Image (tube, rainbow, N blue to C red):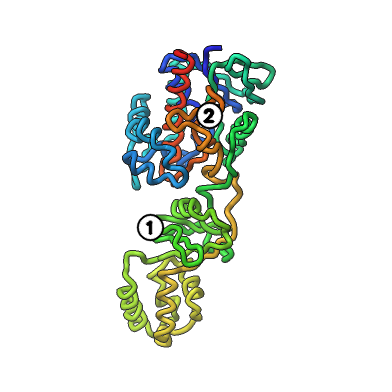
Amino acid sequence: MDSIGIIGGGAAGLTAAIYAAWAGAAVILYEKNDKYARKLGITGKGRCNVTNNCTPAEFLAAVTKNNKFLYSAAYKHTPADVYAFFESLGVPLKTERGGRVFPISDRAADVVNALRHAARDAGVKMIPSFEVRCVTRDADGGFTVSGNDSSHRHRAVIVCTGGVSYPVTGSTGDGYAIAESFGIPVTPRIPSLIPIECAEETSSLSGLTLKNVRLSAFRGDKLLYSEMGEMLFTHFGVSGPLVLSASCHMRCPISETRLEIDLKPAIPEDELDARLLKIFAENSAKDLINATAHLLPSKLVSRVADAAGIPHRLKAAEVTREMRKSYLHALKHFPLTPTAFRPISEAIITSGGIDVKALDPRTMESKAVRGLYFAGEVIDVDAYTGGYNLQIAFSTARLAAEAAAERVMYE
């Protein structure tokens, strides 16, 4: 009875189990899969971007929804703390572009195994292949966790079941049902960090990666997002780091948004215009697409000409001033028309979840149901790509674990 039940053996669940056990509490960890942290094992393209090497303030600035709620978590368990935590578990780390932190081995499995072994070594009782059917409140204020053909009683419960993205990893929204069974409000779930489908034909561009470009998202004339970085074309539209981050800011009806790519962000318009003048003069006898071939990836050459409304086979010498200005505009404002997000099952994270107003930000405990805690993606907080969402999982898990341990051991 005087134990903590943790539901979900992913990043947040394993971390909560470790910290609760380190605090001296008896812990049982329930995982519906036969393996732990399946989603963690595929993050960062199998390399696992565990956190971002930044300050707590910079971390909070990267949280796109309900970042004020995470203030206590950010300073209680900082990115530097996460870095030190994994190195103490025998996972040496490295920092790459954008502050992204990876294991030196580039193996997500090393992160998963370190967490699993640390939980086991701390004395956590780990029960895989246990699907929790319900959590009920006992008359004495404790909880009963029921699933499979057995029930277990706990003084406190931490729900770490994730969202509804990548359901094959076990993230099927179980935590929302648990919350709602107690009357705890849950906000609508939508995809975030998600590729975007476009009206334009992109199958011929599929696989093309653009580096050092600027992607901007607009709603009408209002700028929603603008950053430099990397993106890629797919058979359905666009994806890659810039697109995933842009999707966080496009929660209005996507039909009301538009995207623009600055293909030459490092070159001012007047300088680029002068370069075009020179190119057309030096290649006057060539067709437009041949004259500009060295400016762009080959797959994009004709598409930029189309965006500018200039015939491909027009000789460079025949390009008028107005045409050149149109071509310049297409280079700096290459247009894309979003039509839909990909299915939520393809999202890296779920936006929405346990309403933060229902939780104590210092402990992650439900304000209405004492002893019931939530951590990780199940909560309505999310951030940019770059290790920030795993930082949310680790930070909230530690707060919940230590608060639950104090409740079990001293109250």
- The residue under the point 50% across, 81% down is 311
The quarter of the image holding the N terminus is top right
Residue 229: quadrant of the picture: bottom left
Residue 48 at least partly seen = no
Residue 130 lies left or right of residue 21; in this view the side is right
Q: Nearer the viewer, residue 295 or 364?
A: 364
Q: Which residue is mark 1?
A: 228
Residue type marked 2: Ser
Percent coordinates x, y for residue 160 in the rendering: 53, 30
Residue 4 lies left or right of residue 103; in this view the side is right
Q: Element under label 2?
A: loop
Q: Nearer the viewer, residue 281 or 154?
A: 154
Mark linked to residue 138: none
Residue type marked 1: Met
Farthest residue toward the front? 368
Tell me the distance, in whole angstroms, between the alpha carbons under discs 2 and 1: 40 Å
Residue 106: quadrant of the picture: top left
Please say if 362 is above or below 333. above
Q: Nearer the viewer, residue 368 or 374?
A: 368
What is the crowding at mark 2: few (fewer than 14 residues within 10 Å), some, or many (at least 20)?
many
Q: Which residue is mark 2?
A: 366
- The residue under the point 48% across, 30% down is 364
Mark whose residue sits in front, 2 or 1: 2
- The residue under the point 47% across, 52% down is 240
Residue 353 at least partly seen = yes
Percent coordinates x, y for residue 287 in the rendering: 44, 81
